[in-house]
Amino acid sequence: MQWTDEAIVLRIGRFREADLWVRLLSKGRGLFTAFAFGGSRSRRRFTGCLDSFNRISVSISPSRDGRFLNMEEATLLSGPDRLRRDWRRQGIAANCVSFTEAMGVPPDDAEGCHTLLRSMLDLLEDGCEPCVAAPVM
């Protein structure tokens, strides 16, 4: 059964030659990993979406045997520009993502955690200068 949800891209990694695995925090499903087959070469299904800290609308379906999830397509909703240019902001964002992953996000807490992480990323993108005491990876 295919489903669509809003998600934040947390991590991306290579899987085989043209395929990627993508770690997402979804508004309705929590933390999960999906495979984007052809994701590193696709010009149509994932154009400009699969970068860390992007907020996307993603369409997911289970594999035929139900062992893993496939990303069918994704649409970019917003991407941080200022955060990508400032190493301090990027380090703080990476710490927030690592903390979120370490804590785990069950489906019943997904919406609140998604909102919290999205608010933090928005604050890092639009807010004033980060505190020098904030931990940077």
Image (tube, rainbow, N blue to C red):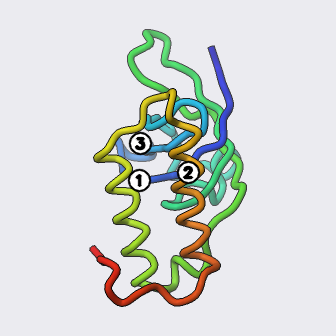
- Residue of label 3: 21
- Does residue 128 sit above or below 116 in this rendering? below
Q: Earlier in the sequence, mark 3 or mark 1?
A: 1
> Label 3, label 1: how many angstroms apart (C-alpha)?
8 Å
Q: Nearer the viewer, mark 2 or mark 1?
A: 2
- The residue lying toward the viewer, choosing from 106 and 45, is 106
- The residue lying toward the viewer, choosing from 96 and 87, is 96
Name the residue: 56% across, 39% down: 26
Q: Nearer the viewer, mark 3 or mark 1?
A: 1
Crowding around mark 1 (Cα neighbors within 10 Å: few <14, some 14 to 19, many 20+) is: some
> Label 2, label 3: how many angstroms apart (C-alpha)?
14 Å
Crowding around mark 3 (Cα neighbors within 10 Å: few <14, some 14 to 19, many 20+) is: many
Q: Position of residue 92 (x, y in %)?
A: 39, 73
Q: Position of residue 101 (x, y in %)?
A: 34, 47
- Residue of label 1: 11
* Secondary structure under the numbered disc 2 in the rendered image: strand
- Residue of label 2: 8
Q: Earlier in the sequence, mark 2 or mark 3?
A: 2
In the image, which disc is placed on residue 89? none
Which amino acid type is marked by label 1? Arg
Name the residue: 41% across, 84% down: 87
Question: Residue extending furthest top?
Answer: 65
In this rendering, position of residue 113 left or right of residue 100: right
- Does residue 54 sit above or below 83 in this rendering? above
